[in-house]
Image: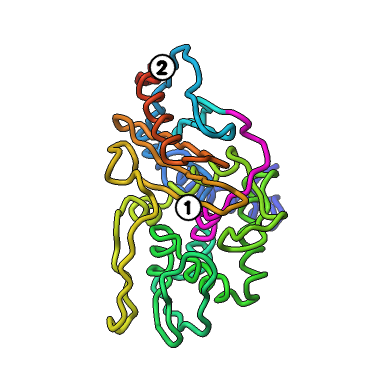
Amino acid sequence: MSILKRKPFEFIIIFLIAFLNLFWLPTFSFWGIYPKNSFFSTNSDLIQYQHPAKLFLKLANKPQLSTQNYILLDAATNTIVLSNNPNAKIYPASTTKLITALTALNIYPLDEILTIKQEYTDGQVMGLKLGEKITIRSLVNALLVYSANDAAFTLANHHQNGEIGFVKEMNLIIQKYGLKNTNFTNFDGIHNENHYSTVYDLSQIARLAIKNSIVTETVKQKSITVEDVDKTIKHELTSTDELLGVIPEIEGLKTGWTPEAGGSFIALININGHYLISVVAQSEDRFSDTKKIIDWAKDNIFWQSYQP
């Protein structure tokens, strides 16, 4: 068909094809530039990617702990290195506050200022006072370092749907990551028969948490001072992690204890630049058990760089 005999709509199609070839397609195929928030990775991303080191494990007996519920995994590859009853039901106690912190960081601006409208006195508290004005960041810090129940209470009640709405947000995160053996009924880990988890699920929550730099920088602090926005009220807080600053491989993470749950501890462990996550639950001595896991790991695990 000659050009003169083409119909008008055919000229429009030809023009569109030519336009795409000149401007749109090169954006993807030649220039290596992708739209913001695209699902495609850039060439730069691919070049910078480094394959995690490969973990090797000696054939060794399990350490002798005071609990039958524990797990150790390689954070980079999510490889389970050591475990016992990883999917058994346990009560998480205050390790709950790790997901409380992640929920708050997910839904609130860090610099938002809250006014304390109700004091909370159940369990360990930092002593927030009526009328005190404090930021979300300060409450999260107190939550992670001192395990302050009143900080958790304040964050939960700030939700537009109150505590119920906040706890629902906590469970939505759990559901998003497919952790089917966990259910939260509260924000601070106070005992409830329907508030439960497993050491495996807690390890996955920890693995998610350490992707947030606010969490990792906060949990490695042995003590902090939290102030109200007017700097007239100070809260001097010491970490509940008794291994922090004592065992050099420990970089935080979150403790828990209730009479019903026993002792629990999620630990972030750095061995020669390689990160491991350990969880012990229903422990008679959570810190001693964690130290034994670290000693076992140092004797039985080594890493080699990936060779394609």
Does the magenta run of residues contain 197?
A: no
Q: Real-space Cα distance between discs 1 and 2?
A: 31 Å
| Mark closer to the observer (1, 2) | 2
Crowding at mark 2 (Cα within 10 Å: few <14, some 14-19, many 20+): few
Say which residue appears at 49% left-offset and 31% top-offset: 73
Percent x, y of residue 44? 36, 39
- The three-letter code of the residue at mark 2 reads Pro
Task: Report the span colored magenta.
Answer: 84-101
Q: Residue at x 44, y 17 (%)?
A: 57
Q: Which sits earlier in the primary sequence, circle 1 or circle 2? A: 1
In this view, the residue in front, 162 or 265, is 265
Judging by the rendered image, the residue that carries numbered circle 2 is 308
- Residue 254, image x and y in percent? 45, 50
Residue 149 appears anywhere in the view: yes
The quarter of the rendered structure image containing the C terminus is: top left
For image coordinates 71% across by 54% down, the residue present is: 193
Q: Which residue is mark 1?
A: 35
The three-letter amino acid code for the residue at tag 1 is Pro
Assess disc 1: are there few (<14), some (14-19) or many (≥20) residues with their C-alpha within 10 Å of its C-alpha.
few
Q: Is residue 243 above or below residue 169?
A: above
SS at mark 1 in the image: loop
Q: Is residue 169 left or right of residue 73?
A: right
Count of number-bearing discs: 2
Q: Secondary structure at mark 2?
A: loop
Residue 291 in percent (x, y) is at 39, 34
Residue sitting at the far bottom: 131
